[in-house]
């Protein structure tokens, strides 16, 4: 049987207090938390997880509504600017002199920005491919890499000022096998 409205309100109030105490850094086994009605540290921890999960669903619904509203606003702006960005119209120079037909370049720029915002809002952007490689684009041989060399590789990956391949990095050679056998 579902909890009554009074029980739901009591649970919400207890969870709100629990969250406040945890934000202040109060440990789960502190008397202030146990006095909220929790039988143990574990019970308080589980209830905090339930509270966070419950709020996640509420937040996801709110975000979905917000995303839809923002999408509709962007669609309205796009519809208003589309004709200026796609249909040729008379173009006039600074002195009002006719210079020919063309599209409104500022409208084109605005349309492209709106499209980019929509793609970002709805998660349509392609993720950037990321590949870590050794010096000169060669494969990274992890069987010959010690922790220090791996950290160096991670730190300098993509760094144009990082170590050059002609500096003889340890992870690029097999001569250092003995150095890493103890790792």
Image (tube, rainbow, N blue to C red):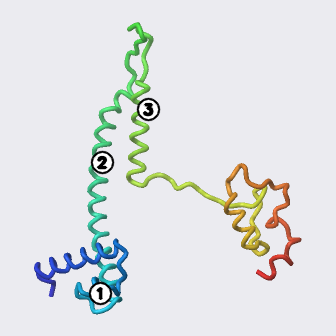
Q: Which residue is mark 3?
A: 109
Residue 94 drawn above or below residue 63: above
Question: Which picture quadrant has residue 103?
Answer: top left
Question: Which picture quadrant has residue 32?
Answer: bottom left
Q: Which mark is residue 97?
A: none
Q: Which residue is mark 1?
A: 31
Dot 3 alpha-carbon crowd within 10 angstroms: few under 14, some 14 to 19, many 20 or more: few
Dot 2: element? helix
Name the spot of residue 169 as percent of width and height, x first: 81, 62
Name the spot of residue 35 as percent of width and height, x first: 24, 87
Seen at 39% across and 40% down, the residue is 114
Name the spot of residue 74 as percent of width and height, x first: 32, 42
Seen at 15% across and 84% down, the residue is 2
Dot 3: element? helix
Q: Which mark is residue 70?
A: 2
Seen at 77% across and 75% down, the residue is 143
Q: Which of the two labelled residues, at mark 2 and mark 3, occupies the earlier sequence position?
A: 2
Q: Nearer the viewer, mark 3 or mark 1?
A: 1
């Amino acid at each position: 049987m579902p909890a009554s409205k009074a029980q739901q309100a009591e649970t919400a109030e207890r969870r709100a207090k629990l969250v406040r105490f945890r934000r202040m850094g109060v440990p789960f086994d502190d008397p202030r938390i146990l006095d909220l009605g929790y039988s143990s540290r574990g019970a308080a921890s589980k209830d905090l997880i339930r509270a966070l999960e419950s709020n996640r669903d509420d937040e996801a619904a709110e975000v979905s509504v917000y995303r839809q509203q923002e999408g509709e606003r962007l669609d309205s702006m796009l519809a208003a600017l589309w004709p200026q960005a796609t249909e040729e119209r008379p173009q006039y120079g600074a002195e009002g002199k006719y210079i020919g037909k063309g599209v409104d370049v500022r409208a084109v720029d605005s349309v492209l920005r709106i499209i980019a915002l929509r793609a970002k809002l709805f998660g349509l952007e392609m993720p950037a491919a990321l590949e870590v490689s050794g010096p000169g684009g060669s494969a990274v041989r992890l069987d010959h890499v010690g922790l220090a060399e791996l950290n160096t590789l991670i730190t300098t990956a993509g760094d144009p000022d990082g170590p050059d391949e002609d500096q003889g990095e340890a992870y690029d050679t097999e001569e250092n096998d003995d150095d890493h056998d103890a790792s």
